[in-house]
Image (spheres, grey):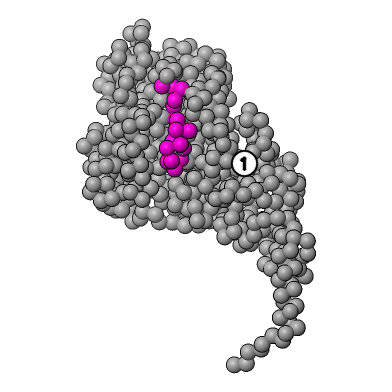
Amino acid sequence: MNVRTPSTPCLLAAAIATLAAGCSHVAPTSPVVAADAVYTNGKVVTVDKQSSIVQAFAVKDGKYVFVGSTAQAQAYVGPSTQVVDLKGRTTIPGLADSHLHTAGGGPGLDLSKTRSLGEVYAVLRDAARNAAPGAVLVSNSDWHEAQFKEQRLPTAAELEAAAPGVPVVLVRGGHSYFLNETALARYKITKATPVPAGGAIPVGSDGKLTGEITDTAKPLVALPPTPAPSVAGLEAQQKILNSYGLTSIRVPGISVANYRVFQQLRDAGKATVRYSILLRPRDLADFRASVAPSGVKPGEGDDWVRIWGIKVAVDGGFEGGLMTKPYLDPLGKNGTYYGLRLLDQPSFNEYVVTLNRAGWRSAVHAVGDAAIDQALTGYEAANADQPIVGKGWVIEHAFISRPDQYPRMKRLGVNLSVQDHLYLAAPVLKAYWGMDRASQVTPVKTYVDEGFLVAGGTDSPVIPLSPFWVMYHFLTRDTISDGVYGANQAVASRDTVLRMMTINNALLTDEAAIKGSIETGKLADFAVLSADYLTIPAKEVQDLKAVATYVGGRQVYRDASFAP
């Protein structure tokens, strides 16, 4: 084989070309790498370890091949390269959500935009006039009483007055239904109905049912079946997610069958969001019956759809967070109500020990401090059986915690997935727990200062899905309707909050090597913003939006205002 050795003049020419390529003022005659696209003249917030801010980057085959100055980026422009002038716009890594069920409240009557009980009743009156005989009026789940000017729930009697003789079931989040009197009668729910453990059928001060049905009591209400998950449904949700600059979400608890639909979306080449999936068997018996024989393996998947682990819930939501101190009356029932325990400690211990032995990790829904105690005790049992340290086990939500719990968390290497529930629900949580506790709900600054990995999200549809609302709330502790709660828990650093919505989520899902920041070699997921997140007044952060979103270098959303 003949090998040609370059002559000295050739070597000199090559050296000069190399120097020119590295010079910020001289462009080479041919690109170092012909990128698919080069983005220039931006304020690119990379979220790398140095929190670098640069002007430009280049993308090839769905990954960043260059990050740096606009002048240097010219070295990656070839004959077919698309060059996009960002015109000074702030560009960030694609946003991620650590705990997002669905993009919005799903089917049913839309109450998300109502701002008073009167508006709710108007929606019900209109629906009742057009309801078919025997139909049940069911709402979507994307609402909360804190959004109403009255800041309270409707009663069964009020719902009845709005839709007399027509069954009404308002679905709120994932924990509660609210029924009118006709619906209570239809489902044969009375004060004599046995209340399942872990559920509630509250009675008001007037001695009548309030109409609320909570947690494990919800199966008493047989709602019409919702449409089965489908590829088309996921595509529709992706469009909404991408419009917020979201490129990755962690899906906190679905069945194996639903997981298969996400795989179908990917296999059809229709994914525009990257999914980290948590399976949620009802209990240990269901895990053994549904997950164990399914063939699904811990950590299986690819850049688009990957299994994270198993979600387990030990307490309820707003009305059911398990506390060491009682709720306030009347919900506190004269100091006897501490929230809902969905699994007893021995059963929970057995569950997580079994998961660990089978190679699975767990994320535990724990709202109250007593629930966090239960989660940690179970995690300690699993760790004593086989180490979980370093495996990234998680506590979801962690509304109310105590300083004595933090050393236990650290010894176990627990990570935290937190959301902005307080932003929407502040006055209701104050009514349940008092201002002292409510003001410290989700103490993000404490968690950051303690050194925990903290990843942010929304819990949509329980809370609206805007990631910018999350960022605004964590920065300011302001709430929609009741001012600032717990200013001591505001995170002053915008960089820290942005990390919670980008690289920290990638760390939570073990994918920081491939996404979560704008760095050479990583997947080119990024969002162009309507304003400069780092410098605008804090009040304006909640009004930010994405004007363009890219996943793997491909534009998946563009606002009409974005015309590069």
Residue 93 place in picture, x, y as percent: 59, 48
Residue furthest out toward the top? 206
Quarter of the image holding residue 5?
A: bottom right
Residue 28 horizontal/vertical position (percent) = 76, 68
Tell me: 464 left or right of 198: right
User: SS class of the residue under badge 1?
Assistant: helix
Residue at the spot 41% in from the left edge and 51% down from the top edge: 307
In this view, the residue in front, 242 or 371, is: 371
Range covered by the magenta-colored residues:
437-454
Q: Nearer the viewer, residue 564 or 452?
A: 452
User: From what the image shows, is residue 3 above or below residue 373?
Assistant: below
Identify which residue is drawn at 24% across, 33% down: 344
The quarter of the displayed image where residue 125 is located: top right
Q: Which residue is mark 1?
A: 243
Q: x%, y% of residue 197?
A: 26, 27
Does residue 5 show up? yes
